[in-house]
Image: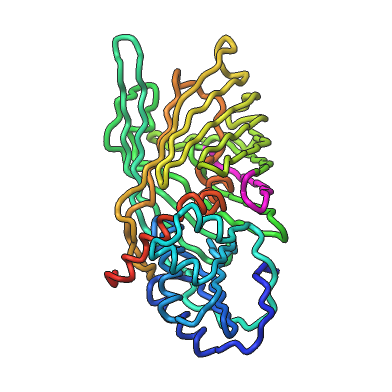
Amino acid sequence: MWLLPVWADGGCDGEVSDRVCRRLAGHGFEHVVVGCSEEKLLVEYENRCYRSQTTGIGVVLALVTEECPNLRFIVLILKRRNIPLVRIACSREDYKKFLAGTISPSEFSQRIEVSRIVGLWDGYRASEVNRSYFKVDAVVVPQVKALFGRAGDWARIQINAIPEVSMPVARGLVLTTQVILPLENEFGAFDQSGDYIRPGRTLVSTVLRFPSTFFLWGSVGYFDAERYGFSAEGLWTTNDGRLSLVGSVGLTGFQAYQGDWKHSELSDWTYLLRSKYQWTSMDFSLTATAGRFLYGDVGGRLDLVRTFGEVSLGFFGIRTTANRSGKLIGGFSIRIPIYPPRRSAPGRFRFGAPLSFPWEYRYRGESSGFILSNRYSLMGWLEDTAPSHIRNQVLDIKTAVRWIENKQ
């Protein structure tokens, strides 16, 4: 049972709903469902066109208010993999004042309602249009690895290009496969895999949402870091997204292609508990992780991350049983967006660029504190739809109008 907003008013105009559905689908939004009353409109949608989810929110608001000038209240349900993730509600009057500049971004962010709880709805609901299932997305992901500070050899670098193909096949279920193409490898004996064309991440992954704010994530196949097996996560978060708690378990083995195939049995268990706290006044988070990590080391990891729109900068410290002499190791991570801000509308086959380029550097380069498929976990999957993030980026909602005015 999916959670949708309560709609108490009757007399929904089906013609208005159909018109809004067609307009949103024509603009590239998927899994569009519209419900309405005399003065209210509900829009469920999935955005795979705009790099920023807050820009997508702004485009939907602009399209809806253009099509329905008599609205008084708008409710949006933002979805991913056709799973409802967050509810955004605002009055049309507040939105128009925000566009006109008579209320500030901070005031508008306080007036809108943003919550992980999306509620129940038993009113009129138009049929879903423009599904994403069996639409193939192809991108080329850049990968950079580096080692710095070794005596007599101060810098080594490895650069790979990774073609990736993904395809949604059902609600919450996506197939993904990669091939790693080496472009430059200065690691030598430290990492000879950088000399070979080899398979990358090849996974079947699914996500489920339960009542309230609990999610389950499962993946099976070939992961990053030359591991194959399965992984499962459960996440609970508060309504405002301020606090998240995650439990995960995985069973993997080694598998790699280095001129020929090498592998081990499925025997390495990973189990972790993670907690994340988000300061709502700014996009700053602290994540603590404890348990048994990917390579069998036991200990903890602490991450501090500051987000600036679509750019993030983080620092981390790790202490586990794999650390030499028990020393704390550290490093930093960055994530930057990749041009363009708007992708073409998804079709049966779409080729484009990935949304962002993430990179992590570890001082001392030790194999401790690694988290299986960290970039594809529930925490990362939900990050750009966190209520605090949406509130802090409401200026993107205002500037998104240009995509309508320029008819792009």
User: Which of 399 and 311 lies nearest the eye of the viewer?
Assistant: 399
Which residue is found at the position 32% from the left and 43% from the top?
161
Total residue callouts: 0
Which residue is found at the position 65% from the left and 44% from the top?
244
* One can see residue 136 in this view: no
Q: Quadrant of the N terminus?
A: bottom right
Picture layout, residue 223 above or below residue 327:
below
Q: Residue furthest front?
A: 102
Q: Provide residue 256's location: percent of width, then percent of height.
A: 46, 36
Q: Is residue 26 left or right of residue 299?
A: left
Q: Provide residue 380's location: percent of width, then percent of height.
A: 53, 46
Q: Provide residue 137's location: percent of width, then percent of height.
A: 39, 61
Picture layout, residue 243 above or below residue 10:
above
User: Which of 219 and 276 lies nearest the eye of the viewer?
Assistant: 276
Is 232 inside the magenta-drawn segment?
yes
- Which contiguous range is marked in magenta? 227-242
Picture layout, residue 329 above or below residue 42:
above
Picture layout, residue 12 above or below residue 102:
below
Q: Provide residue 192's location: percent of width, then percent of height.
A: 37, 28
Is 89 inside the magenta-drawn segment?
no
* One can see residue 276 in this view: yes
